[in-house]
Amino acid sequence: AQSVTQLGSHVSVSEGALVLLRCNYSSSVPPYLFWYVQYPNQGLQLLLKYTSAATLVKGINGFEAEFKKSETSFHLTKPSAHMSDAAEYFCAVSGSRNEKLTFGTGTRLTIIP
Amino acid sequence: GAVVSQHPSWVICKSGTSVKIECRSLDFQATTMFWYRQFPKQSLMLMATSNEGSKATYEQGVEKDKFLINHASLTLSTLTVTSAHPEDSSFYICSARGTVGASYEQYFGPGTRLTVT
């Protein structure tokens, strides 16, 4: 079975500062890992995904994440926060191509002007 | 490409009535569709997985007789909440996987907010 833990249900950063959202996973097989963003009253948009290729994954809107097997982590980063980044972020894992996604509890990102 | 729509986006119904939510893949064929439920400020909980032409597979604890899922075509899945009660009020999100992108990628709809009075 697979699971993810997102540390910090709420993260606040100043505009222009580094964004770091943490995700640790547990998987009995090589995982597929995803980060999604959700704006209020909307569905989920895929930011980036790791599928056993490059360990440093670049996504949309300037976000990137690094897969670290030794730390079982897949933290999401962005060098400079923008006001439009304020949203809920979910890390998700699946154990194979056709397996269902298991979501973390989410991290609400607030940007301070 | 890979657009998923949901209808309605928002619905209010009276307790004891049934409500149907549609999920459509607009520009690809969805061989598998997923239905999630999300309570305020919480994560997404998978309710069921449906493959076109087959019966849905429900997650443990989800009442299949209460949440009826039909995936009759490669572009449409429906979720019917039968005899709705206030505790069924939630945000329902569907996703689809199929003939676009990688085989494991899910594309999410915008969600439907259900309020039962």
Image: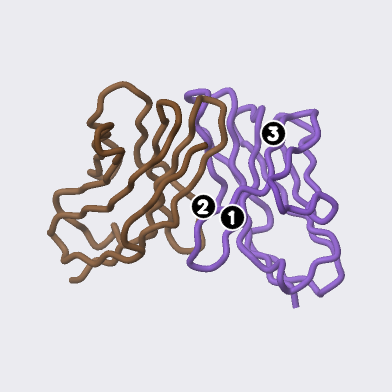
Chain colours: A brown, B purple
Residue B75's disc number: 3
Residue A7, image x and y in percent?
A: 32, 57
Which residue sits furthest bottom? Answer: B117
Depth order, front residue of A91/A72 = A72
Report crowding for label 2: few under 14, some 14 to 19, many 20 or more residues within 10 A (C-alpha).
Answer: many
- Three-letter code, disc 2: Gly
Q: Quadrant of residue B69?
A: top right
- Tags 3 and 2 both on a single chain: no
Q: CA distance from mark 2 to mark 1?
A: 5 Å
Q: Is residue B70 above or below residue A81?
A: above
Identify the secondary structure beneath mark 2. Answer: loop
Residue B2, image x and y in percent?
A: 52, 34
Report crowding for label 1: few under 14, some 14 to 19, many 20 or more residues within 10 A (C-alpha).
Answer: many
Depth order, front residue of B11/B68 = B68
Q: Left of A66 or right of it: where is B111?
A: right
Which of the two marks, 3 or 2, is nearer to us in this view? 2
- For the residues labelled 2 and 1, say whether their Cβ atoms are less than 8 Å apart: yes
Q: Which residue is mark 1?
A: B111
Q: Which residue is mark 2?
A: A43
Q: Chain of mark 3?
A: B
